[in-house]
Image: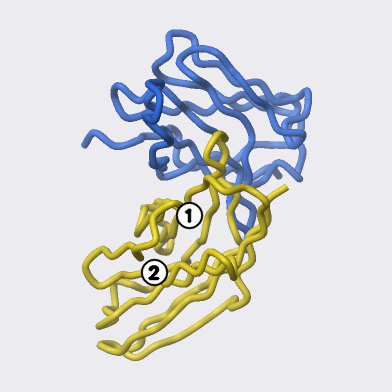
Amino acid sequence: DTGVSQDPRHKITKRGQNVTFRCDPISEHNRLYWYRQTLGQGPEFLTYFQNEAQLEKSRLLSDRFSAERPKGSFSTLEIQRTEQGDSAMYLCASSLVDSKPGGGQETQYFGPGTRLLVL
Amino acid sequence: AQTVTQSQPEMSVQEAETVTLSCTYDTSESNYYLFWYKQPPSRQMILVIRQEAYKQQNATENRFSVNFQKAAKSFSLKISDSQLGDTAMYFCAFLRGSNYKLTFGKGTLLTVNP
């Protein structure tokens, strides 16, 4: 399977603990995105990487959140001092964006998500 | 900021029938993309169909087709010959041409009944 993979699929933690999620994008995809989805809502953008550079962070991403993509391949999303309000599905997506003129945007392909429950 | 509105929280259809899901969006951009994603229960989100705003022809993928009305900022999804496996949450999403983040609607839960 060469799709986007995420690990773990489920995580239960106690308030105040730190958690880290991993995302492996589709090979050769140069962009990687993190979204958060709460119950009954569509996904909301958190941050994205172009290769290893983190180019944009949403206001939803508080100081307790940090994301990395150290070698431009997999990415990690860490939440420090978790709060009950952090309970959500965390989705990762990847895409291949052509930098040549007229290359345009490519479709984002999503992973299965990591469902976080903070008790 | 772009907004995407899906006015039908839930819909149901009988197997083999046709159903249309509605989506409207608000933007001042001229270069953008629209998507329909499907998220089955407890399964990952997959792309159903995409439409480039500069293309007048409506996109079609097998039983799935869209009615893209650019002036009205409407992007509805038609599912023909509905199958039980079509039961899922359907999200409409907008991507600005020079942007990177998808803006999603709240979704429509479609149930296909046998």
Evaluate if marks 1 and 2 touch, with contact meaning CB atoms under 8 Å apart: yes
Q: In this view, does B58 lie above or below A56?
A: below
**Quarter occupied by the C terminus of chain B:** bottom left
Q: At numbered mark 2, what does the secondary structure look like: helix, strand or loop?
A: strand
Q: In this view, does B73 lie above or below B110?
A: above
Q: Residue B34 carries which label?
A: 1
Residue B29's x, y, as percent?
62, 47
Say which chain is yellow: B
Q: Quadrant of residue A51?
A: top left
Q: Mark 1 lies on which chain?
A: B
Q: Name the residue under label 2.
A: B66
Q: How dense is the environment of label 1, judged by Cα within 10 Å: few (below 14), some, or many (20 and up)? A: many
Q: Quadrant of residue A6?
A: top left
Residue A77 visible in rendering: yes
Residue type at tag 1: Leu
A13 vs B83, nearest the viewer: B83
Report the residue at 53% width, 22% height from top.
A49
Q: In this view, does B83 lie above or below A112?
A: below
Label 1 and label 2: CA atoms lie apart by: 10 Å
> In this structure image, what is the colour of chain A?
blue
Q: How dense is the environment of label 2, judged by Cα within 10 Å: few (below 14), some, or many (20 and up)? A: many
Q: In this view, does B97 lie above or below B5?
A: above
Report the residue at 76% width, 45% height from top.
A85
Residue type at tag 2: Val
Q: Which chain carries label 2?
A: B
Report the residue at 32% width, 29% height from top.
A26
A67 vs A45, nearest the viewer: A45
Question: In the rendered structure, which disc, 1 or 2, sits on the residue that comes first in sequence?
Answer: 1
Q: Is residue B50 left or right of residue A50?
A: left
B65 vs A80, nearest the viewer: B65
Residue B24's x, y, as percent?
60, 67
Residue furthest to the top: A71
